[in-house]
Image: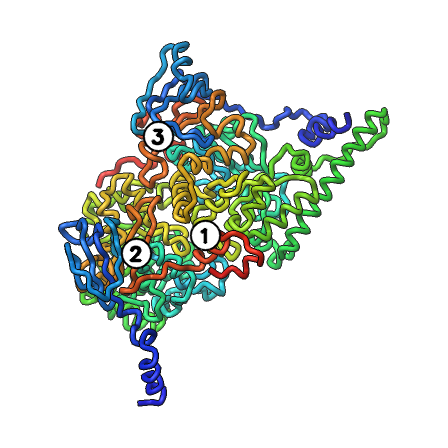
Amino acid sequence: MSRLHNTLRRLAAAAPAILALPLSAQTIFIDDATVHTLLQPGPMESADILIVDGVISAVDYGLEIPPDAQLIEAEGRPVTPGLFAGISSIGLEEVGLEASTVDDKLMFEEKPVADKLRPEFNVALAFNPDSTVVPITRIEGYSWTLLGAQRAGSIIGGQGRPAMLGGSYTSLIGDPVLFFDVGADAVDQSGGSRAAQWMLLSQALDEAGSAIEWTPYPLLTPAGRKALELFSGEASTAVTVFHVHRASDILQALAFAAEHELKPVISGASEAWKVADQLARAGVPVLLDPLINLPYDFDQIGARLDAAALLHEAGVTIGFINAGEATHNARALRYGAGVAVAHGLPWDAALAALTINPARMFGVDHHTGTIEAHQRANIVIWSGDPLEATSAADQVIINGRLDPMVSRQTLLRDRYFAPEGELPRAYEKP
Amino acid sequence: MTAIRLKLCASAFALCNGMAFAAEPYASTYQPIPAPPTLIEDAIILTGTGERLEGASILFDGGRIVAVGAGVTEALAERQQVEVIDAAGRWVTPGLIDVHSHLGVYPSPSVGAHSDGNEATDPATPRVWAEHSLWPQDPGFPRALAGGVTTLQVLPGSANLFGGRTVTVKNVPSTSYQGMKFPGAPQGLKMACGENPKRVYGKDRMVAPSTRMGNVAGYREQWAKTQKYIRDWAEYEAAVEEGDEDAKRPERDLGLDTLAAVLEGEILVHMHCYRADEMLLILDLAQEFGYSVSAFHHGVETYKIAAELADAGVCAAIWSDWWGFKLEAYDGIQENIALTDRPDGSCAIVHSDSSQLIQRLNVEAAKAMTRGRRLGLDIPAERAIRWITANPARSLGILEETGTLEPGKMADVVIWNRDPFSVYALADRVWIDGAAVHDRHDPALQPVTDFELGQQLEVSP
């Protein structure tokens, strides 16, 4: 054993309180909660949750409180899985307009269209768990996000990945997710016509597969071929997100995904309600912003506030995302879910669209999305209805740890909430 | 006498110039829709004056509020054929007011042809008027109406130090913007601090400003010109008065007309400004040139200077939780509204700057109220409602006419299906000047813009 390790062992012996109790080894007991398990048969009233070593060890009525447990008296408050913060650039973007702090898009100044198609670009490599946005989002009840990839003006955004918001350097979970962007947004980069987007995507997928051995004008780099190949084919489980709004384009996406054996999720989806039956039949889930009800462009003429309700009613699995302010105000997503409820979506379906549904879509439901024994303990205790504007997260548990519920914003708040002292506020360090 | 004439000249230079303008150019042609006297019974009423009335009634007639709570029975006895609405279990508030909107000037769909909000060709464009860009067919107007918004201020964008004149409109469907224009509301002047002007101009175009100090120099130059403009006209008027037939009439300058009207107190300053230090700097600038700021807009840091703003009588029009999209928005906190509201004499406003948020100002206010309460501040609903009614009315100079439910005021009224401080709340019915203009359950009272008409025809599957 190295000298360093010996030193550490001696330190551990001398100061067991610090070193012998890694934070993940907490035992936490939540007493008397209304537990939204996101499983059948539904919420459990006056139930208890026991968390040991980062994992939920039991959810039941009348559990015994272990002597070493940190006790949280929920007093009937709602408890949910940590919420999904949508597709975001949390940890990839500190200040929107400051390019030196933004890593969520590829912006080489390449001219030929071909050079813009870089499926091998993966934003997850830039994820910074120390970003202030991480705790600012987490303490509002959000456990994870899907890091989204954008290629400025390209129909292939690149790859993203689900990330936990625990602030750890090992936050990435699940498999990479591929992003396509079709419709009006990317028309400039596809020769002026959205029809050409399918032409280019087809060629790219053919290059990635075996259909084309060699072409004089390839769209993809060799690395791009390798990357794209992982997402197509019957055996592939990796998900491709199609960002698309117009109903007719959504149907094209379904046909394209079937032809190329992709596993699609439709995102954006302002007009998805118009083709809800086709989506339901194809078993393709939809991510949408429940607040979009204006024709922001000609692809979204049909946007409406009851879109989530209509999709759910048709049997489509839905998840929620923020279309605007998706990173810094990812925390506002739950209010949108509440608005969807006001416009006809059942409450339980709205909560599922923030928890278990997106977790299943991206294959991370063994990390988050339910409250059950053996699940990772990503849990939120709410002051009231978690979708309500007058509620807030009282206590977040992330990876089985009690969150200190502190962010740069709470510190700013406390600094200026305090009565003015004799010294300037810079000396007030809450 | 000179002073009076100077004021006249400054407020309506057209008169001094002998031009054929009306006292109010591009005058409002808004006419309230005729409506029967209406009684709303048995509601929980948030009056906007800080009061909450339980099981109370409100009566309006002829477009104006006749009585609220006490006095309704008496006033009712004098009237016949009153429409009576049972609001048991429901809530009534003043029509909501958004002090910061770009509806009509950045309308939906936001295609290139609709980009009419920033005259970003010159950092000082006090000569332009937002109303001259306003497209009344923006689908955002009826959406905001469904959210209970009865009055809004439409502003130019923030690319310029001086963005141009704002317009306050009633949220009524109309073929022209004049048909929406709030009768008698003062115009505003949109000004901008900070990052936007120096980013839009600056190094890329080699046009000042490229720095914050360039911004301030830009404001000061214009105000100094304005002072000279006012002086030149005063001297000219005095010379004419003394019978000097050779007196040379100064040339009319549309931008300086606007700025002169600000210095004369006729036009209210609405200033886009995020940072606390910049807002305090702007208060000094205003003092230097003798005007006042009506409201700082987007002040994500107003919580740092709440007392100073209250002392200066300046309103703070802010979001509940937006932050971080640029560096000057980095210090935003969710308690901003509650902390800004705390001092005596404060004027906190929840604003939208968004075609989405304007549809749910009540939810934004609920979020802000909740953050304040979680800090232990006592913020009842009857206080928080002022952030989206009376306070914006004050900052727009229309509090005498709307923003609260008091006898004599415009009958701009909303019935909510439940406590409006809830994410689930929906406006059941909205009245503007006593006329029902939106009803959630009655398609006949749901306006559809020309743009949206026929866009959603049934297709075969």
Q: Residues within 10 Å of mark 1 (few under 14, many from 20)?
A: many
| Residue A355 falls left or right of residue B415 | left
- Quarter of the image with the N terminus of chain B is top right
Quadrant position of the C terminus of chain B in the picture? top left
Mark 1 secondary-structure assignment: loop
Specify the subunit that label 1 lies on: B
Whole-angstrom CA distance, mark 3 to mark 1, is: 29 Å
Q: Few, some or many C-alpha atoms within 10 Å of disc 3 (few <14, some 14-19, many ≥20)?
A: many
Chain ID, mark 3:
B
Question: What is the three-letter code of the residue carrying label 1?
Answer: Ile
Amino acid type of the residue tagged 3 in the rendering:
Trp
User: Nearer the viewer's eye, disc 1 or disc 2?
Assistant: 1
Q: Residue furthest left?
A: A41
Number of numbered discs visible in the structure rendering: 3
| Residue at x-position 42% and y-position 37% | B140
Vertical position of residue B267 compared to residue B79: above or below? below
Amino acid type, label 2:
Phe
Viewer-side label of 2, 3: 3
Q: How is the image coloured?
A: rainbow
Residue A416: x %, y % from top left: 50, 53
Q: Is residue A20 above or below residue A369?
A: below
For label 2, the residue is: A84
Q: Which residue is mark 3?
A: B91
Pointer 1: what residue? Answer: B333
From this viewpoint, is residue A61 visible? yes
Real-space CA distance between mark 2 and mark 3, rounded to the nearest whole angstrom: 33 Å
Is A307 in front, or is A3?
A3
Report whether residue B111 is seen: no
Q: Earlier in the sequence, mark 3 or mark 1?
A: 3
Which residue corresponds to the image point at 61% horizontal and 49% vertical from the top-left?
B280
Marks 3, 1 in one chain: yes
Q: Position of residue A246 (x, y in %)?
A: 32, 47
